[in-house]
Each structure stands twice: as structure tokens, then as C-alpha cells.
Image: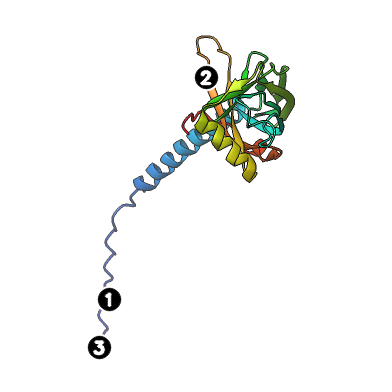
Amino acid sequence: MLRAAPIQVQPAEPGPPPRRCSACVAVFITFVILSGLLFVLVLSAALFGEQKYYVAIDTASGLDPATDLPWPVLTPEFNLTLRVTSWSVVGAACLDPAMDVAVAYRGLALARASPPPRVCARGWGRTEQVPVVASSGNGVRLPGFALHGLEADAWGGAVAFDVALTMPPKGRDNRHQLWCRAVPVGDDGGLGIPCNANSEY
């Protein structure tokens, strides 16, 4: 009688030990660090964001091309609206009575405003605005090229002016200037465009 030979089962060879995903850990740590830095930047911007200034020219007088511009001395007057917006959660954005407000045409000063009252916008996205009047005092003379350009713009209905805001110094900081460019008369669209530090024409 034949007897079946016993079957021997060889034990499986042990596989390589599991390796830790060191690359995954590095990516996770980098993600956490970058997320923390982004959070700090966003929080700082929200807590200590800067203020923005805006200007609209509501009306202008003394610049009629038929009755005013033919004369060598102009006496313009501008009714302005100054707006300040706070982009800080804890700080305040203010219009300072020491702020100098000047209206210019092609870099030539036409009028200066009376000091604005002190008003402050407090809180993220909060806004305050005040009316001010800018006048030329005893009048202003413009060189021929500027006068002719102003007359042509006035007849064409496309006259616009620049408004310069000179801020008072704070601590050791010197006075700095912001410009609101090409502000049209009678259009509050300027209140949607912030003034900036670019002084180039």
C-alpha cells in the first residue's frame, strides 16, 4: 500500500519592516507653519489696518469759461467732501484739523481748504465724511498753457482737478502727502477711489 509523502509548507519570508512616511510628516509640518504665518498676517491686517482717504468735488465756482477764464486772475472756490475709512478692528481713522487740503490743476495750486473738523471712523470698514470749502483767497494767476488747457477742458465739459492731502507729522514721521487724481466736478465717484502717495502726472 502506497503512503502519501507528507507535504512540507515553507514559512513565508518576513517582508521589509514598514517605513514611516517622513515626506508626509515634512509636508504636514510645512503646511501648519505656513497656515500659522498666514493667520498672523490676516489678523495683523484686521487689527492694525491702515486708513484710506477719499475726496469728491461737489461744486466749483469762479471757473466759468465765458465769464471767469478770460480774466488773468481767477478766484475759484470748491465745495469738497472728505471721507476717511478705517480698515482696522481696534484702531481709528481720523481726519485731522492739521491736515492741509489743496486743489490743483496740472500741478498748479488753485485753492486751499479750511481745516476739516476732527472726525474719526472706528471699526472695520467704518466711514466718516465731512464737507469743506477750498478757496483761492486773493486770487490766483495761471500760466498761459494751463489757462488755455483749463478753458478747453471747461468748454468740453471734461474738467477735472487733483486734490492733495498733506498729513501732519506723527511722532518722528515727517509730513507726507496723498494725491486724489483727476477728480471731476459734481461726481461723487471720487469717493470710491482712495487717494495714494503717487505724485507723478
Residue located beneath label 3 in the image: 2
Pinpoint residue 140: horizontal percent, then vertical percent: 60, 21
Residue located beneath label 1 in the image: 7
- Residue 60 sits in which quadrant? top right
- Label 1 neighbour load within 10 Å: few <14, some 14-19, many 20+: few
Secondary structure of the residue carrying tag 3 is loop
| Residue under the image location 58 percent in, 14 percent down | 168
Question: Which callout, 1 or 3, points to the residue nearer the camera?
Answer: 1
- Label 2 neighbour load within 10 Å: few <14, some 14-19, many 20+: few
| Residue under the image location 60 percent in, 37 percent down | 151
Separation of residues labelled 1 and 3 (CA atoms) = 15 Å
Marks 1 and 3 close (CB-CB < 8 Å): no
What amino acid type should be assigned to the residue bearing mark 3? Leu
From this viewpoint, which residue is outermost toward the top? Answer: 171
Secondary structure of the residue carrying tag 1 is loop
| Residue under the image location 35 percent in, 47 percent down | 23
Question: Which callout, 3 or 2, points to the residue nearer the camera?
Answer: 2
If you read the primary sequence from the N terminus, does the residue marked by circle 3 or circle 2 appear first? 3
Whether residue 143 is visible, yes or no, is yes
- Horizontally, residue 59 falls left or right of residue 110, namely right
Relative to 28, say whether 135 is above or below. Answer: above
Identify which residue, 165 or 22, lies in the foreground: 165
- Label 3 neighbour load within 10 Å: few <14, some 14-19, many 20+: few
What amino acid type should be assigned to the residue bearing mark 2? His
If you read the primary sequence from the N terminus, does the residue marked by circle 1 or circle 2 appear first? 1
